[in-house]
Amino acid sequence: MTLMCDICKRTAGRGNSKVERGKAKYLGGNGRKTTGITKRHYFINLQTVHIERPGGGAMTARVCTKCIRSGLIRKSVKRKPFTLAENN
């Protein structure tokens, strides 16, 4: 099971974690100095959700929160909404 979104195929990113010392110039200091740079990973926020298939039915998928918020997926209805019985 990979750390990848099933919808948009996003994976973890890479970057640097920077450690600095000193005071910023606009605050009255001599400026910030970098004292260390290390590699790091940016993991995406994956959620396991029940979604509707395009042909009908439901399935479980690992989806990033960006896809959930943007409306790329449609969550499946787990049970029918409550209705009152009609008396005729």
Image (spheres, helix red, strand yellow):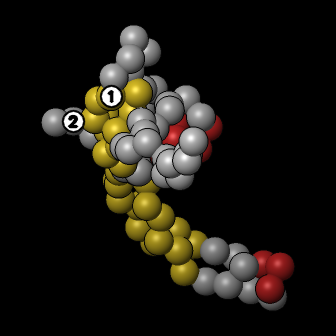
Measured along the vertical axis of the image, is residue 73 above or below residue 81? above
Q: Amino acid at mark 2?
A: Thr
What residue would you read off at disc 1? 58
Where residue 4 appears, as percent x and y from the top left, is 32, 34
Badge 1: few (under 14), some or many (20 or more) residues near its Cα, within 10 Å? some
- With respect to residue 58, does 87 lie above or below? below
SS at circle 1: strand
Q: List the single residue furthest toward the bottom.
A: 28
Classify the position of the N terminus by image quarter: top left
Q: Which mark is residue 2?
A: 2
- The tag earlier along the polypeptide, 2 or 1, is 2
Residue 41 or residue 10, whichever sits in front: 10
Task: Name the residue nearer the viewer: 54 or 79.
Answer: 79
Mark 2 vs mark 1, foreground winner is: 1
62 relative position to 69: left or right: left
State the residue at coordinates (29%, 29%). 59
Residue placed most toward the observer, 36 or 42 = 42
Q: Position of residue 60 (x, y in %)?
A: 28, 35
- Label 2 secondary element: loop
32 lies left or right of 27: left
CB contact under 8 Å: marks 2 and 1? no
At a point 53% along the width and 74% down the height, the residue shown is 20
Q: Residue at x 31, y 34 (%)?
A: 61
Q: What is the three-letter code of the residue carrying label 1?
A: Ala
In this view, 38 is above or below 46: below
